[in-house]
Image: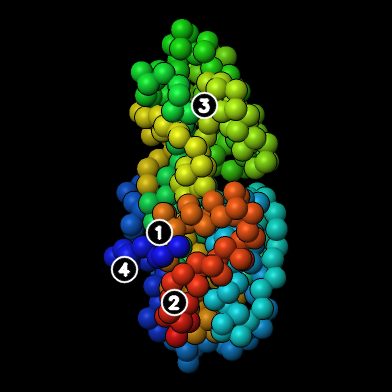
Amino acid sequence: MKRRQFAKLSSAGSLSTVLLSSLKQPSLKAQTASTAFPTSTITAQENNNLSTSTITVARLPLSMYAINSAFVEIVAEQKGFKVEYLDGLHKDLFPALAEGKADILTSLWLPYGHRTYWETYGSNYITIGTIFQNGISYFVVPDYVDRSIQSVSDLTKPEIAEGFNKKISTIHVGTSMYEKSAQIVTDYGLDKVGFQVEPGDSNSWQAALEEAIAKKEWIVFPLWEPHFLNNAYNLRPLVEPQGIFGGREATFLVANSDWARQSDPNLLASLSRINLSLDDLNQIDYQVNVDGLTPRAAVENYFQDNPGLLESWTK
């Protein structure tokens, strides 16, 4: 797939002389997806040169995070580093990064998705760069659902609710998707007409949608972009008037602050250049989940389709 052209974005960790020292806790009230989070830099002379040749990447259990991690792995290899993975759930990996059990985490969604983790552990993180801009979370329904249903508020009407499967499947507890889905059900009063949130792993969550579509069943489904399901099925986002999911946001590549201060400035400069479009990530995710490629193979294909891109990131 050809890389789409888009304007150069001001990223959270665009590093000129690179490295980063401390990251102040920003007020998130007015942050938007295009906001650059504040950083300060350490020059190469200030670097302690204590970096090792192996980087531990915290990898969350969803294909998009595995894809982001594959981009980091390939870029790091070009700079002479090996990557090993620490796999786990959100509730385990965000503190692991703060504690130095991992060096890098590839997907911190701000200002909405991972705000709680940021406020809890962000004083021990440093932003390296912006993986992508304008990600978003929402409830969707299959497009065959009556088109008069356009808003989450519509689901509160008993005559509409009775047509739906009342189970709203999400990914596991500790994720923004679960917590905010549960909040929507409570705050909108969807529980009063029978809706309930059921957490699970990514397989059970995805299966809930696919099984409903196979039966032409009406279902409310939490989703986000980028994700291959946006391309795989005809889905219609519902308006969410209270804004519980938030709006468009950015996903940052973040590092443990102590590790970053000791790391190779050239490595961090290369990692800071990783920047992708939603369209490209949707397609790569589709190749992984539908075409059956590994995240590594799909990312390698992406570089093959975009000659010179990897070299420009690792120059």
At mark 2, the secondary structure is loop
At mark 1, the secondary structure is loop
Q: Quick check: marks 4 and 3 in contact, CB under 8 Å?
A: no
| Residue type marked 1 | Ser
Indicate the quadrant where residue 214 lies. top right
Q: Which numbered dot is residue 158? A: none
> Which residue, given by chain and number where applicable, does mark 2 sit on?
307
Indicate the quadrant where residue 258 lies. bottom right
N-terminal of the two: label 1 or label 4? 4
State the residue in front, 264 or 60.
60
| Residue type marked 2 | Pro
Which callout, 2 or 3, points to the residue nearer the camera? 2
Which callout, 4 or 2, points to the residue nearer the camera? 2
Q: Position of residue 187 (x, y in %)?
A: 47, 23
Q: Position of residue 198 (x, y in %)?
A: 64, 29
Distance Cα–Cα, label 4 vs label 3: 36 Å
Q: Residue at x 45, y 15 (%)?
A: 156
N-terminal of the two: label 3 or label 1? 3
Q: Quick check: marks 1 and 2 in contact, CB under 8 Å?
A: no
| Residue type marked 4 | Lys
> Which residue, given by chain and number where applicable, does mark 3 sit on?
220
> Which residue, given by chain and number where applicable, does mark 1 sit on?
277
> Which residue, given by chain and number where applicable, does mark 4 sit on?
8
Q: Is residue 265 visible?
A: no
Which callout, 1 or 4, points to the residue nearer the camera? 1
Q: Is residue 300 visible?
A: yes
N-terminal of the two: label 1 or label 2? 1
Distance Cα–Cα, label 4 vs label 2: 18 Å
Mark 3 residue crowding within 10 angstroms, few (<14) / some (14–19) / many (20+): many
Q: Residue at x 32, y 49 (%)?
A: 30
Q: Residue at x 59, y 49 (%)?
A: 290
